[in-house]
Amino acid sequence: MEGASDRQDTSVYADIETIRLPFLDDYPLYIGLFSHLKNATFLRKQLLEGNQDFEYALIDATSILSVKHVLAAAFRAINDMLHGRLRSRNVHSEIVYSLGANNNITDAFRHFGILDSTTALLVIKVGRASSDAAVTHDSVSAHLRANVEGQLLPFNDENIVGLSDMAKIRKLYKITSADAAGKGGKKKGARADGATNGVKAALDGGGKGGPLTAQEERVEMEAVILGTMAMKGS
């Protein structure tokens, strides 16, 4: 049996991720993924009270499908900020809004934002490389480690999959299990469940035989989700 001294706490070795999006080099993303969160109520309180030290996008990680899902929302939010199109208070709240399947800000925060019951958390801080030297990888990492009571995990698809609530995500984006398995029974290009024609065609599966694997289903769901997010507000 594995002894206590043999077990490793991955939070000791994990760190937040710094990601630079294409064409947005000046706005690095500092991202932390936490499981076993114990102080969601405290973090949500700081957010609701407008505590500037906690100006992050605080996202319930069970509502997230993949890394690409997160980065697509961040890309849209930063672009909307740069073009004066923010629909919410700041770029961090805009990331949460951008994850939503419709234009209802309240729905987006209820479905994707941190709740008192949240136990898996995705935290995003948008930096400004040219002007805000105070926001760095090290400063964000130190602040999150000091204030988030949870296990820090590497930000990757494998860990996101381990936290995702697939049934919840299907419901949020109106993706039926039959659709995701390629058994929708509708003609290619048919509009259904709020998806655009081309995206829905990907779900219907064409001539696929039999159910999709879990990985294939995620890829098909991701196509629908990204299409829905891209079409929102257009």
Image: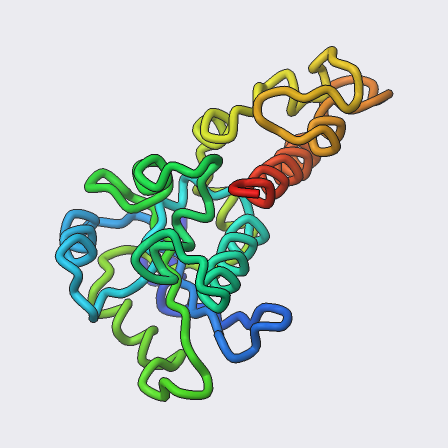
Quadrant of the rendered image containing residue 216: top right
In the displayed structure, 212 sits above or below 27; it is above
Q: Would residue 41 be seen by someone viewing this image from the given angle?
A: yes
User: So how many labels did they put on this image?
Assistant: 0
Give left or right: position of 97 versus 230: left
Quadrant of the rendered image containing residue 22: bottom right
Give left or right: position of 103 versus 183: left
> Residue 223's x, y, as percent?
66, 39
> Residue 60's x, y, as percent?
35, 45
In the displayed structure, 94 sits above or below 23; it is above
Residue depicted at 38% across the width and 58% down the height: 7
Give left or right: position of 165 versus 44: right
The C terminus - image quarter: top right
> Residue 166's x, y, as percent?
50, 31
Front-most of residues 181 and 150: 181
Residue depicted at 47% across the width and 25% down the height: 171
In the displayed structure, 67 sits above or below 81; it is above
Residue depicted at 37% across the width and 42% down the height: 112
Front-most of residues 185 and 233: 233
Q: Would residue 8 be seen by someone viewing this image from the given angle?
A: no
